[in-house]
Image (tube, helix red, strand yellow):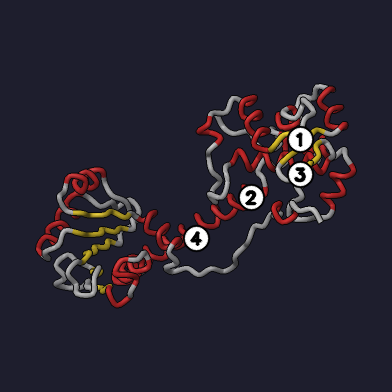
Amino acid sequence: MAIPDYQALMLPALAALGDGAEAPIRVTRERVAEAEGLTPAETREMLGSGSQTKFANRVGWAMTYMVHAGLVERVRRGVHRLTSEGRRVLSAGPARIDLQVLNQYPSFVAWRRKKGPEAPRVVSDSQDAPTDTPEEALGRAAEQLREQVQGELLARVREASPAFLEKVVVDLLTAMGYGGGDPDMGHVTGGSGDGGIDGTIREDALGLDEVYVQAKRYSEGNNVGEADLRNFAGAIDAAGTTKGVFVTTSEFRHAAQTYVNRSPKRIVLIDGAELARLMEVHNVGVRTRVRHEIKRIDEDYFDIDI
């Protein structure tokens, strides 16, 4: 099942503290997961950033919001306890606790009005309230920007000349660490009489081992077939090597993929979508415009008695 959003987890998290005892956040998460019927695999699902699990992130934000509303108190680092108001709310048997409910508490509203980076956007109808935690919202926005940039990269490469694509591929492989990342180890060889090889990457200084490259600037829908791969395999065989990278700005037909899987040659296929993704990841044809840092309170720093 899908992991409930942070608002849907507020009531289960509050109920997890229903015995009135102090509870470490780890125990609270375990109780919530059991109450919601989540499997271990589901609770281990990671955020897009890979910094934390979605479940832990959402339970953490649910607790943070309820602390600011006064339903829960933070006893010490990572340990919470139900407040008298929290007990009153639970005893009333609410069907749901969400931002609309928390808006009834002046302390929560005052925290929100500070407009800090952690304060949630509050709307009149809880059904329209954001379901993403701040980290999830930022991650989703970053992913949308990545997809947009990758789409633009692929469009630009398709519009450029075949010779430019050959340069892009060699630059990309170099940026990925082939040839030790040394630009001098990669060469574009495309042109008349190239023997079906558009570029090479020397993996060692003496040139004892090389990766051969073929790049096809095809329009969308004009997919690479088995014949193209057979010709490429023959070209790298004639060159006396076994390694090759075949790149296209379109896609590969099933027959082409099947041929490569069965071929004794070590040929890697990179289609247009993967080419754009790798270019974005390895900073080929793009520049970092702005960088955001996400910071949280260092609980260890404040866990001292002075």
Dot 4: few (<14), some (14–19), or many (≥20) neighbours within 10 Å?
Answer: some
Q: Is residue 39 left or right of residue 25?
A: left
Give the residue at x 22% y 50%. 225
- Earlier sequence position, callout 4 versus callout 3: 3
Dot 3: few (<14), some (14–19), or many (≥20) neighbours within 10 Å?
Answer: few
Q: Which residue is mark 4?
A: 149
Where disc 4 sits, the SS reads helix
Q: Which residue is mark 1?
A: 98
Find the distance from the CA under tag 3 to the CA under tag 1: 24 Å
- Earlier sequence position, callout 2 versus callout 1: 1
Where disc 2 sits, the SS reads helix
Amino acid identity at mark 2: Glu
Q: Which residue is mark 2?
A: 135
Find the distance from the CA under tag 4 to the CA under tag 3: 44 Å
Amino acid identity at mark 3: Arg
At which x and y percent is residue 4?
A: 63, 33
Q: Which residue is mark 3?
A: 76
At which x and y percent is residue 81?
A: 78, 35
Give the residue at x 78% y 55%. 116
Vertical relation: 2 (above or below) 177:
above
At which x and y percent is residue 232?
A: 17, 58
Looking at the rendered image, the quarter that the N terminus falls into is top right
